[in-house]
Amino acid sequence: MKALGAAADPDTDDLDLAVRLLAATPTHEGRDPALLRRWAEAADAFGAALEPGPCRARIVERDDGLEELLLARYTSRPATVEICTDTVDRAETLIDELGWRSWYPVGSVRAAALAHESAHEHFHHKETRTALKEAIGHSALRLGRFRVLAHVAGAEEIAAHAYARTVCGLGRSPLLLTAALAAVVGAPGREN
Amino acid sequence: MGVVILLVMAAGVAAMLTRKLPTAFALVILAVVIAFVAGAPLTGKNSVVDTVLQEGAPALAATMIAIVLGSWLGKLLEETGVAATLVRKIVEFGGDRPVVVALGVLAVSALVGTVTGSAPAAMLAGLIGIPAMIAVGIPKVTAAGTILMGIAVGIPFELPLWQFFSTALELPVPTVRGFMVKLFPFALVAAVLYVFVESRRRGVEHTWSLKSVQDKPRSPNRRQRLGDAPWYALLTPAVPLILALGFELAIIPSMLAGVLYALVTTTRPREMNKRLLRTLYGGFEVAAPPIALFIAIGILLAAVKLPGAVDALEPLVKAASPQNAVLFVGVFTLLVPLCLYRGPLNVFGLGAGIAGVLISTGIYPAAVVLGMATSYNQVFGVADPTSTQTVWAAQYAGVSPQQVMVRTLPYVWAVALGGLCVTAASYL
Ligand SMILES: [Zn+2]
């Protein structure tokens, strides 16, 4: 078995992965890792508590995911979830190779992809977005008692992964699987 | 003789289009050949060596200084985190609504573009702006286009450009400024429309990418160590513009004031000297390509203004140039694509030569040529898949420059139409 690199080490906890995602999201350059950790924690808890709902978007399959380093994509107009079947298949075999079946049951990758993208649909509702901002509690502006809550880029993504983990009953965050996939399909910027 | 000159120009365009020669080199060779064909002597009055090369090369010196200052200011905005802070604040305030983020980034790239010129502005606003837009769900092509359309909003107020047109077309700065103010509403409306229409058409997208949890191989970034720039420092890009537009101060002092403002609002006195020199020298690197181009354009302008060239070209160009206002607008609107791909109407290529011919032969008043040149500039500044800012923004967003061209061209073509209408109505 190939070494997966630090990011996909199963000993890395899910929250570390979420922090890593935030740190790689633009606008968070140079932010305090402890702060990012608090945000990641809040976003994760928020996503895990999101009301499960059906995915109403149209589902389309494509098979160029490995090439594009993509597992799934959500587009709002029209509401469509694209599932990259080749990446999903590769993920399923990888789970077996790594002995991670207890975390990711058979068929759970596709289910997680659908759940993840339907979480994005959740966030189309203003109330959900506002609730996430409140959960994170970062202010863009504060003048005495008056404050404007800030949008935290990447938080929605962490919440979507937490939602997928919860509704699909995964043992670990889909982020761990993402990191492992990135390592084996040889995403640019890493050696192996 | 005129026909020979036109053939030489066509060959020059072919060399630039096929990338056989970098534009700046091609223009200099073109200038020398045109001068010889026009019967200029080797040395002396109206000669190849003394007039075209010696006097032509520094003809656009003021523009070059403005470019250096703009690049210097760009480096300062980068190093002090001003550009990054602006984008970060926009995302914090408007991230819930991608359209708001796009409009904010549009405004930043417009504002930054007015001082630094197009290519540095694309990088300054786009470096964080493009991934930030993608992070809030704006599709990649729309994100790249937003940066470029934003720059186009700033183009009418791009100070180095005022200097360029003023010197190259021999018009006073207030005339250039007066026309640019009329061109601005078209650019603004087109850009805002672009954001709204493209957002409606494409919506948002979110990807579950395999790259999301990777350690980015990040370039060592000074911003890592610096926090947000203070709020009053964020006004830096507006300082030169307010001075030049509001107080009608000359261009170079306005830009110097911007440099000073950025410095005192962000830098401790002890570190000022070091930072100033470092960013100034860094600015030269950014300014090198446009300066090389402006040296070449100065040489080309000197060549096409030689009496021999003017006499040879006048009858030909006259026959092809409509004087009727409606025809003028129609013909030159249809010719818009000729400014793309370093085509013959690109003002920062052969187009400068053509502009020079039109003025020196007296076919159009200089103000009309200004109107044409600036209208075309609005197009290729955004949509030309070979211009630095378009290539950079597209590639950085992960799409092809051609995709960006196709998406933005209808909007900027309409801007050119508007500019040509204003030109015909005001000056023909
Ligand atoms: Zn997502």
Image (cartoon, coloured by chain):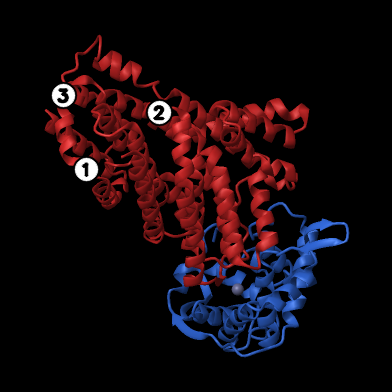
Chain letter behind tag 1: B
Residue most extreme to the top: B44
Measuring 51% from the left and 53% from the top, which residue is drawn there? B147
Circle 2 — which element?
loop
Q: Mark 3 vs mark 1: which is more N-terminal?
A: 3
The residue under label 3 is B37
Q: From mark 1 to mark 2, how far is it between C-alphas?
A: 22 Å
Quarter for ligand 1?
bottom right
The one nearer the camera, B167 or B401, is B167
**Relative image position of residue B114 (x, y in whole percent):** 54, 41
Drawn side of residue B312 relative to residue B378, left or right: left
Q: From mark 3 to mark 1, how far is it between C-alphas?
A: 27 Å
Label of residue B198 in the image? none
Q: What residue type is labelled 2?
A: Leu
Q: What residue type is labelled 3?
A: Val
Residues indicated by labels 3 and 2 sit on the same polypeptide chain: yes
Residue B10 figure quarter: top left
Which chain can be seen in red? Answer: B
User: Quick one: label 1, few (<14), some, or many (20+) residues within 10 Å?
Assistant: some
Label of residue B171 in the image? 2
Q: From mark 3 to mark 2, how far is it between C-alphas?
A: 28 Å
**Relative image position of residue A104 (x, y in whole percent):** 64, 84
